[in-house]
Image (cartoon, rainbow, N blue to C red):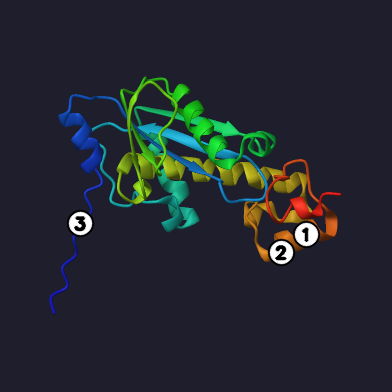
């Protein structure tokens, strides 16, 4: 049997938009939908057409060391990067889906270069008057979305590491707020912190 490796064309969706006349294409992704604590963070990234890097991929498929290296590279090479942050209290008030979409909108608004086309990870459009295309598993299919996933993931991980200094009993530097066994045990033993999501299973049952 011949092992044929098909090279991923991570510029497919970007090039499709370029052919339609768009010029500033932003990839958008979020980090932090699943955790029990901390914010949800989105990144919007506009890359130059000449940007190439074979290591770019969905941030979840990369090692921490590789993510950190690519994070720095993307910041060096990107045309523009915008971040959007929605805290845990807002997540509890409007639900995690709406909070994620809101963080994406904030990220777009924080771009210094205005995009004319959006490539969004997932199945939902953003409430923005900009042409856009949601792409399921887009962080593995689009170089712009994959770059946004790296920026969002590293940014959020760094924020959670800082929270670990304030709330060391919960090991946020390790679990990043996700519902690990030890994290849930810490909530059961010590209660929840001001950054926990009170509407999430694993937290709300410990609210008196």
Q: Secondary structure at mark 3?
A: loop
The quarter holding residue 77 reads top left
Residue at the image position 13 percent from the left and 80 percent from the top: 1
Image-based side of 189 in relation to 202, left or right = right
Q: Earlier in the sequence, mark 3 or mark 2?
A: 3
Q: Disc number at residue 123?
A: none
Pointer 1 residue? 186
Image-quadrant location for residue 50:
top left
Of residues 107 and 127, which is closer to you in this image? 127
The answer to whether residue 104 is left or right of residue 172 is left
Residue 166: quadrant of the picture: top right
Separation of residues labelled 3 and 1 (CA atoms) = 44 Å
In the picture of the structure, the residue carrying the numbered disc 2 is 182
Query: What residue did someone put label 3 on?
Result: 7
- Location of residue 65 in the rendering, given as x and y in whole percent from the top left corner: 47, 54
Query: Quick check: marks 2 and 1 in contact, CB under 8 Å?
Result: yes
Q: Nearer the viewer, residue 116 or 59?
A: 116
Image point (64%, 45%), residue name: 160
Crowd tier of the residue under label 1, counting other residues whose Cα lies within 10 Å: few below 14, some 14–19, many 20 or above: some
Q: Residue furthest right?
A: 208
Which residue is at a point 65% across and 47% down the rendered structure image?
Answer: 161
Residue visible at 30% across and 44% down in the picture? 142
Q: Are marks 3 and 2 in contact (CB under 8 Å)?
A: no
The spot of residue 108 in percent (x, y) is 44, 26
For the residues labelled 2 and 1, the Cα–Cα distance comes to 6 Å
Q: Is residue 203 left or right of residue 153?
A: right
């Amino acid at each position: 049997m011949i092992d044929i490796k098909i090279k991923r064309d991570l510029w497919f969706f970007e090039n499709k938009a370029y052919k339609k006349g768009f010029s500033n294409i932003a990839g958008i992704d979020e980090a932090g939908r699943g955790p029990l604590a901390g914010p949800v963070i989105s990144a919007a990234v506009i890359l130059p057409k000449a940007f190439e890097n074979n290591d770019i991929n969905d941030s979840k498929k990369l090692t921490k060391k590789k993510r950190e290296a690519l994070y720095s590279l993307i910041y060096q090479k990107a045309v523009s990067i915008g971040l959007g942050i929605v805290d845990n209290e807002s997540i509890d008030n409007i639900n995690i889906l709406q909070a994620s979409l809101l963080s994406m909108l904030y990220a777009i608004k924080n771009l210094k270069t205005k995009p004319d086309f959006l490539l969004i990870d997932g199945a939902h459009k953003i409430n923005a008057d900009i042409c856009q295309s949601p792409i399921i598993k887009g962080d593995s299919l689009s170089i712009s979305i994959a770059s946004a996933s790296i920026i969002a993931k590293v940014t959020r991980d760094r924020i959670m590491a800082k929270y670990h200094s304030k709330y060391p009993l919960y090991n946020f530097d390790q679990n990043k707020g996700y519902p690990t066994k030890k994290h849930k045990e810490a909530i059961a033993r010590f209660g929840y912190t001001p950054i926990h999501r009170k509407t999430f299973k694993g937290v709300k049952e410990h609210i008196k």
